[in-house]
Amino acid sequence: MKKLISAAAIFFFIIGSLNSQVLYDVRGLSMGNTSVANSYELDAFNQNPANIVFQRGNNNSKVYFNIFTTFQFLNNSDYLSLNFYNDYFGEDASGNAFVLTEADKQNIVNSASDQKTTFTASAKIFSVIYNHPYAGSFGISLDDRVIADFTPSKDFLDLGLYGNLPNRVYDLSQNKVNGYWTRQLNLSYAKILNIKNNNLIESISVGGSVKPQFGIYYFETTKNTLTIQTSAQNIFQSTGESEFQYSGIEEDFNIKFPSGNAGFGLGFDAGVNLVFKKFSGNGKLNIGLALADVGFLNWTKNNARYFNDGNFILTDITNKEQVDSLIDKIKLTKTPVPEFRTSLPTTVRFGATYRIYSPGNKKLTGLEIASVSFDYIQGITDKLGGTTKPRFGLGAEFNAGNVVSPRAGVSFGGDENTLVSLGLGIDTGPVIIDLGTNNITSIFNPKGTSNLSAGFNIKYKIN
């Protein structure tokens, strides 16, 4: 079984393991991915730079910072869960691989065929915000962002699970593998503009970010028209072509850490947040708008392209010498390429947050008792893990005193399923902790969900 899967993987562009990208804010993650109007200080990086100037409630701290204490990941799939993997590709109590039944094989084919699976992750290496009473807020952060996705076709799974059946044509053109690893330095500035003699708007905050980009790894399927035909004598013949391009990966697709920079680019964010006076008797309304990740990345290190013309014949797919010969043939097609450019995953965010204060709080100041937020996220490009499919989010937060803040939300659209999120914030004074997930089943059934996610954040403040 494993030999057949390995042999079929040759035609699926054999690569090493890759990880993922694009989640930033744990608090927003647990509130239905809302952030453009409701984020504060460090959480506003990469979401809306205008919000780095805001602090929770009556806080008036000069400095916020964290170091290696913010991590998030997400597996988004219609079928791939820990239970799915363990049931079909795991081992029994004796350490032996399971032998798949015909029913098992058919279930894998029915579940996974032509279904895209995406792994994303991010880590904030460090971030700092300094609030000046007159000049505004200055911020800097360093983030790693990784993403990988793959799509197996039905014929690819048939080939791997059932072997090369006679008199059969396998269409592998839908197979795709993509992976990216980038690092960015974020330099942000924001300032609140107080509005005088205006009965509607209380203040406007504006902000911007300059974000130098450092490419670590890049891998993308650029072309695939491969088909495989078998004869009555089990002769295995391929036609068509496949092509993939990469940067930063070493010979034989070995990934080493640290690898140095494989590319450099520049990105920009811009945002605004309007605060409306007494939108109702007990609340205020914030309206946020942000444009994020406008820019590019030039890939320059160890750039190459592999091209497989697809014209080969195998008389025995389980023959190691023939399979090794095919792998060597593919390796010999490596062609160095000059530097190439990719755009960043540009997005536009629009959102609103309604903050509800206690009935006795006539001035509507300090910490609200609850808030409700809505975000609309529109991708402009589909590069580096982006998507042009719009996504919507709705979230809420309840502040139980000044310490504990439970959160919940729902998000739908984009490349992800409809997900219900949940989280918790704990403010102990100098230390703030955020826990969250954008899929509630990650908590109650982590092995069974195919949309596993979690976020963890600790940040510190200095008055």
Image (tube, rainbow, N blue to C red):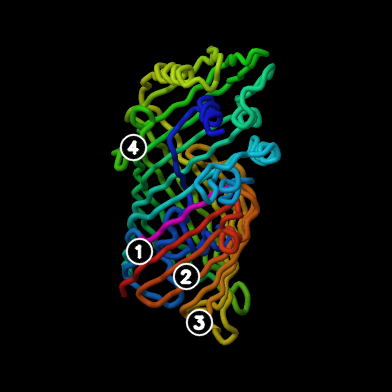
Residue kind at label 1, given as amino acid type? Gly
- The magenta-colored residue range is 69-77
* Residue that badge 4 annotates: 264
Mark 1 or mark 4, which is nearer to you? 4
The residue that label 3 is drawn on is: 401
Mark 1, other Cα within 10 Å: few <14 / some 14–19 / many ≥20: some
What x and y, as percent, mark residue 275?
Answer: 52, 67
Q: Is residue 402 visible?
A: yes
Residue 119 colored in magenta in the image? no
Pointer 2 local density, CA inside 10 Å: few below 14, some 14–19, many at least 20: few
Q: Is residue 132 left or right of residue 296?
A: left
Amino acid, disc 4:
Phe
Q: Which residue is mark 1?
A: 136
- Residue type of the residue flagged with mark 3: Gly
Quote the CA–CA distance across marks 4 and 3.
46 Å
Quadrant of the rendered structure where residue 166 is? top right
Q: Earlier in the sequence, mark 4 or mark 3?
A: 4
Q: Earlier in the sequence, mark 1 or mark 4?
A: 1
User: In whole angstroms, how far apart are the C-alphas of marks 3 and 2?
Assistant: 32 Å
Is there CB contact under 8 Å for labels 3 and 2? no
Q: Which residue is mark 2?
A: 196
- Residue 229: give its label: none
Q: Where does the image place residue 377, in percent across and percent down from the top left?
A: 57, 50
Q: In this orientation, which residue lies closer to the viewer: 19 or 112?
A: 112
Which of the marked residues, 2 or 1, is nearer the chain's N terminus?
A: 1
Looking at the rendered image, the disc whose residue lies closer to the viewer, 1 or 3, is 3
Q: Is residue 118 above or below residue 418?
A: above
Camera-near label (3 vs 2) is 3
Q: Nearer the viewer, mark 2 or mark 1?
A: 1
The disc, 3 or 2, on the residue closer to the chain's N-terminal end is 2
Q: Count all numbered tags in the image, as a single digit.
A: 4
Q: Quadrant of the N terminus?
A: top right
